Image (cartoon, rainbow, N blue to C red):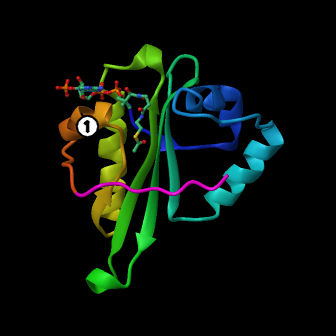
Amino acid sequence: MIPRLIELSDYDNGYIKLLSQLTVVGNITKNDFERQIKNIMSNSNHLIYVIPDSKTNEIIASGTLLIEPKIIHEMSNVGHIEDIVVNENYRGYGLGKIMINHLTEKAKEKKCYKVILDCSEENVKFYEKCGFKSKEIEMVKYFK
Ligand code: ACO
């Protein structure tokens, strides 16, 4: 299964339902979704990939790659991996690893010198299996 870029029609392919297995999504209309996806599609450094079920077209996995152009490291790029999720009925079949490998290859193509991500303790083993290692700590400040 090869991930493909998200499309406007993925609203009707259960994309919001999949994301709700990752975190809070809120009420998003088809219009809202299409406006945001068009906005994202206009930015070549913001790539959302999905894996559809080959029979039903339902989106069963998703992941995002953000490319950050740097001044340091000889004006190289850093890839940020975000919002990885696999439908709970399809976990354990290698889709998560396929998605991470795909995003990592895209980051290399985009001349990134590294890819980084934040995750919970319970996902550390998964990312280690994908070739990542722990480095430093994450900090956050939320705005209400
Ligand atoms: N603990 C230990 N090992 C794990 C775990 C885990 N929680 N999850 C997967 N693995 C292992 C698998 O056994 C497999 O090992 P193998 O290569 O030796 O066979 C390897 O990691 C790859 O597993 P996949 O089957 O590719 O993983 P899956 O498709 O189940 O997806 C994922 C993993 C994405 C974490 C899924 O469980 C999920 O969607 N979880 C809920 C959402 C979530 O937490 N997303 C990550 C947020 S962090 C971020 O977005 C940067």
Q: Is residue 90 magenta?
A: no
Q: In terms of image quadrants, where is residue 28?
A: top right
Q: Answer with left or right where residue 91 lies relative to residue 55.
A: left
The reply to whether residue 26 is visible in this rendering is yes
Q: Could you say where residue 129 lies in the image, as x and y percent from the top left?
A: 19, 36
Tell me: residue 68, above or below residue 80.
below
Quadrant holding the N terminus: top left
Q: Residue 85: horizontal and vertical position, in percent?
A: 46, 33
Mark 1: secondary structure: helix
Give me the residue at 58% from left, 24% from top. 57
**Where does ligand 1 appear, by image quarter?**
top left
Q: Residue at x 77, y 52 (%)?
A: 35
Q: Is residue 91 left or right of residue 113?
A: right
Q: Estimate how packed mark 1 is, as few (under 14), some (14 to 19) or many (20 or more) residues with alpha carbons within 10 Å.
A: some
Read off the residue under disc 1.
124
Which x, y percent locates residue 133?
18, 48
Confirm if mark 1 falls within 8 A of ligand 1: yes
Residue span colored magenta: 136-144
